[in-house]
Every structure is written in C-alpha cells, then in structure tokens.
Amino acid sequence: MTDTETRRTFITRASALSLVIPGVGSALVACSPRGGERAETTAAQATAAQATGGSHNSDSRLDSSVLRGRAGAATGAPVAGASATTYHRVAPELPALAPGGLQRLSWHAREAPVRIDDTTVVAAWTFEGDVPGPIVHTRVGDTVEFTLTNDADIPHSMDFHAAQIDPKQAFRSAVKGQSVSFSFKPKYAGAFMYHCGTAPVLMHIGSGMFGAIIVSPRDALPAAKEFVLVQNEYYLAAPANGVRASDYQKMLNTLPDIVCFNGRPNQYVKDPIHVKLGDRVRFWVVSVGPSHPCNFHIVGEQFDTVYLGAPPSNSIRGVQTFAVAPGGGMVFDLVCDVAGEFPFVNHGFGHGQKGAIGLLVVES
Ligand SMILES: [Cu+2]
C-alpha cells in the first residue's frame, strides 16, 4: 500500500468510526400549520399564523418551535426506500454567471433522503432536494429574483447573506404549499452563505438547509480555476430503516458526528479536484456551521492571497491557515507552482478527521 493509499484508508476509517456514535431518539414528524392553495404569504397571514401557533420566531414570521419541549428528539422523517438512495459527488466547480445580469431562481424546500457516503443516508431538509443547495453565482449589482415554494410539512424560509433587505418581509417563512418571493442586488463581492432562517435556525441549518451564493466583483479577479467549498456539520441519530435523522440535542451540544465539504465526508479524497501546474486556484469557502468554523489550510501550499471580504479589497498575502467563521465566507487563492497531491483540510483536526478534508491534485 502506498503512502497515499494508507492516508486515504486511514481518513476513511477514521470518518467511518465517527458514524457509530449512538444517536438519541427516533424520527419525529413535526406538526405545523397547513397551507392551503399555493399562494404568496403575506406578513399579515404570517403574523396571524404565528399568533395562532403561539410560537416564538426571532427572525422570520413562522417557525417550527412547535418542537419546543421535545429537545433530544431527532428531526426529519425517514423516507420509504431511502436506503436505496444513490450517492453522487457534488461538483465543486464555480458555475458560470447567468447571462444578462439577471439570476431567476425558483426553488422548492422539501424533505429528501441524501446519501452522503457508502454507509450513511441522511433524512435531510433541503433546498432543491440536495445538501448543500445549489451554488448560486452572481455579480455585484446584478439582480437576483428568488422564489421559494415550500413543499414540506413544516414552515421554511430563505435568508441570503448576500442581500441587504428587510428580513421580516423577505426572509419570512412559508407554510406548506405557499411561496415567498423577493429580489435583491448584491452590494459586495464575496463568498456568502444562504440558509433557512425559520426558528429554531439551528435545527433548519443542521438538517441541511444551506448553501453558497458567490458574488463576483464587477472587475474580474485574476483568471483562476474556481471552486466552491461549503463546510457543514451533521448531527445524526441512530439509523432507522437505513436512514439517519438529525438530532437536535446533539446540535445544541455542538459535538458533530461528521464535518465535511459540500455535504459529503471525504468526497474529494475519494474523487479529488484536479488542476494543472501553473494554474491559479481559487477556493470560495463558506462555513455554514451551524456552530463551527472552517480553519482552511492546504498541506504543502501557502495562499498567495486571502480575501477577507469584498474582493479585490481586504486582501492579505502569504497565508498558511485562516478561519472562516460559521455564517461567513472567504476567498482563498493559491498559485500551483509545485506538482503533487495537496490535502485541503479544516486544520481544526478534530473536524478535519470527521470528514472536512479533500485532495487537490496538481498535474504536471
Ligand atoms: Cu427550514
């Protein structure tokens, strides 16, 4: 066995070990206000629903804190046949900009089984059926027109960190069958998080409702091979019918079972990212948490430039490791002038060991 194979085997085994931690409770099906005809929710409707539901909601107008008092219960419901869900690698490449300066997005919030490795299917709450949700790529000053339709039994919402907008209106929750629409023009460039903002936010992010919106500056950055890495944590209950629900008590305790990039532990160790010698490589790194940072580091390399916010401003040079706070994003450039296999890791190694690691292969 080569050194590389040994390292990959160790990493995979170490990650697999983290999956046997026993979970708490079994699946829970949350009750919630039921939506009627598909319709735009209004603030009045939402407020009325909140009043009748008697639920607290700090930053949106409906919530799922109907779960209050059931701490320790797992969230999400096992889905029939979910264990047959197939695995797919999440493409890390930054997608092209939408033409014409307009990005129209019509997404659905729904529950879905997501296979994150050979042994684990998560009963996830999702945007568009996957974890993370789709990568959005826009540009400073362009327009994002967004509609979220909720197909799920509990309320959900959307909070774009790239927007400056009244959150009580735009980020309000929709009940089943209803939609919320809003638009915005990003003011700053950067790697931004999006997530469901329905309370308790911890539960909605922890169950899979997150992703990245990448905002490029008007004046292009140096040409690069560009990739997006979204780091998240999973807090999972014991398997039931081949599926693992999320465990809210574990989320509160902030001791994750898995920490990973783009929703799958070790996926870029199994199937690395390839670039060519001489390439400039740009990682747009978003740490969605819900509770831990990504201490981003590339073994055997140094970052030529790290943009702390709004590239091309706020840059620092010659960096080994930089922490991306939960709820934050940064841009990491390196120039690949050495060939080889370079592990990119969360250098908080308790979390790197749980799956937040991948390989960048620089081909000569
Ligand atoms: Cu949600």
Image (cartoon, rainbow, N blue to C red):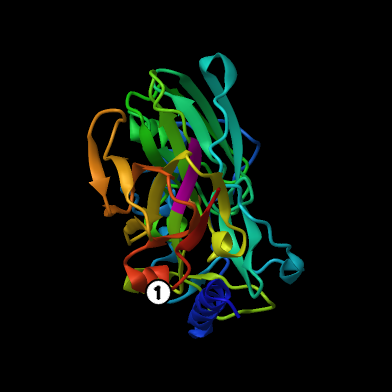
Q: Nearer the viewer, residue 354 or 209?
A: 354
Mark 1: few, some, or many residues within 10 Å (few <14, many ≥20)? many
Image coords of residue 22 (percent x, y): 50, 85
Q: Does the magenta stretch include residue 330?
A: no
On the image, which quarter does residue 78 sit in?
bottom right
Total numbered badges shown on the rendered structure: 1
Residue pointed to by mark 1: 250
Residue pictured at 55% horizontal, 64% vertical? 269
Give the vertical position of 146 relative to 306 (above or below). Answer: above
Residue pictured at 41% horizontal, 22% vertical? 220
Residue pictured at 51% horizontal, 49% vertical? 155
Q: Is mark 1 within 8 Å of ligand 1?
A: no
Residue pictured at 65% horizontal, 57% vertical? 112
Image coords of residue 205 (percent x, y): 44, 55
- Classify the position of the N terminus by image quarter: bottom right
Image coords of residue 261 (percent x, y): 48, 57
Q: In this view, does 3 lie to the left or right of 328?
A: right
Q: Which of 336 and 218 is in front in this view?
A: 336
Extreme residue toward the top, this view: 100
Image coords of residue 120 (percent x, y): 62, 72
Callout 1 secondary element: helix
SS assignment for the magenta stretch, majority: strand
Q: Is residue 122 left or right of residue 189?
A: right
Give the vertical position of 310 relative to 99 (above or below). Answer: below
Res 158 seen here: no
The kind of residue on which mark 1 rests is Lys
Q: In this view, does 168 lie to the left or right of 75?
A: left
Q: Which stretch is magenta? A: 225-230
Give the vertical position of 150 relative to 358 (above or below). Answer: above
Res 74 seen here: yes
